[in-house]
Image (cartoon, rainbow, N blue to C red):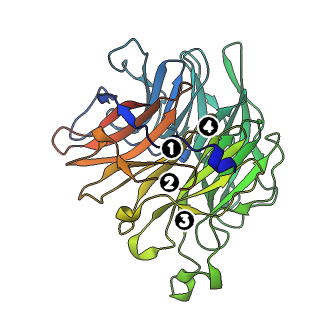
Amino acid sequence: MLLAVLAWPAQAAWQWSEPLTVNSVRGAKVFPHMESANRRNVAVSGTTVGVVWEDNRSGSTQCYLATKPAAAAGFQPETRLSRTECYEPAVVALDGGRFVAAWEEGGKVHARLLPGGQAVPLSNAEAGQGTLAAGAGKLYAAWAEQAGRFRHIVVSRLEVRAGTLRAAPAQPIEAAPPTDEQGWPALAVAGDGSVTVAWEDRRDRHTVPLTSHSEDGRSFAPPVRLSDLPKGGGLGRSLGLGAGTGAMRPTLTAWGAQGVVAVWLDKRDFLSGYDVYAAFDPGTRRFGPNVKVQDSFGDNMAQWHAQIVGAADGRLLALWDDARDGTPDVWMADWNGEAFGDNVAVPAAAGPGVQSDPAATLDASGVLHVVWLEQDEQAGTRVRYAHAEWK
């Protein structure tokens, strides 16, 4: 019943703005990347949009934040976040035009309050793949941190006091040392203030997305598998594909009053590559059965860079890129209360050439903000942005 209540009217449609270019420095040898854990590359504080990415314009990989106030015609000159080589920046919005960014630099995870704040190290041990989530007046970071031979997932509560960002001691999801690699965490803070974490886990000798839940951000429930367990031990194993077919890059979003939704890339239909699957936690802190996201036109090819985006009022949609029309385009599907609807291309992120790596967020008024990469061999890669209203 909850899924039906949170359905969105199907007769309306997204009305898109003209696209803008975000990065001010471009060229055939400048390569931007947007690959943050949980795909947190865009956020909106009030009416100000913030976008983070990494590129090599300086001769080494550095992380940048660009912002666009509503009154501005375009994005303002970007702020460099890092001093040495930097990877996988993520961003989350606070109030009053403020943002918090996180990134990997020097083998550790750092965070910074913007504008004006100083970088704060979050990890003591070697770490990477940091991500952020805010909701219900709380702010959290998660990352993959070295713990002996392997990395495990840890979570820290962040607070802003007197314009300074402070981090509580990081809490591992599990007290026991990891038995294999863990990485690419995703975070969501539900409407009741509880925290859900998902990540890639190799303990079963193939990559499986696991989840855990915490009421207070300090004590976490035992991990639970997110992807459905195939019958008969798994199709991949029966066909000689090792321990299983694998899944990767989980993303999470808060949804409705207390719900959380997950989306990830799943190779259970291994002949066509990765597909996009979703699962719903309506507030019980248990995810239900898996739901395929892409439609039949996308079933025969691989999907990449999937993200789920939700809002408290019931809006829910997924984005990814695939090459069903001959070249990579950005696609999206809205949840209609029973299933994800027909896949629709983002107008400015489709057509000839390569449009990929989407990241998105919904602001407080329900406007959808999307960024992606547009590649051109001659002019270089552009970070592109457009917004859409539901009308």
Q: CA distance from mark 2 to mark 4?
A: 26 Å
Task: Name the residue that disc number 2 marks.
Answer: 340
Element under label 3?
strand
- Name which of mark 1 and mark 4 comes first in the sequence: 1
Q: Nearer the viewer, mark 2 or mark 1?
A: 2
Disc 4 marks which residue? 132
Label 1: state its secondary structure. Answer: helix
- The residue that appears at 42% across and 60% down in the rendered structure is 295
Pick the residue in front: 150 or 282.
282
Q: Which mark is residue 39?
A: 1
Q: Is 249 situated above or below 204?
A: above
Can you tell which of label 3 and label 2 is closer to the viewer? 2
Amino acid type, label 3: Ala
Specify few, some or many for label 1: CA neighbours under 10 Å numbering under 14, 14-19, or 20 or more. many
Instruction: Name the foreground residue: 222 vs 118.
Output: 222
Label 3 – label 2 distance at C-alpha: 20 Å
* Residue 365 rendering spot, x and y as whole percentages: 53, 24
Position of residue 108 measured from the top left corner of the image (x, y, whole percent): 60, 41
User: Tag 4 or tag 2, which sits nearer the N-term?
Assistant: 4
Gap in angstroms between the C-alphas marked 3 and 1: 16 Å
**Which structural element holds mark 4?**
strand
Disc 1 residue type (three-letter): Arg
Label 2: how many Cα within 10 Å (few below 14, some 14–19, many 20+): many
Identify the residue under disc 3: 247
Q: What amino acid does circle 2 point to?
A: Phe
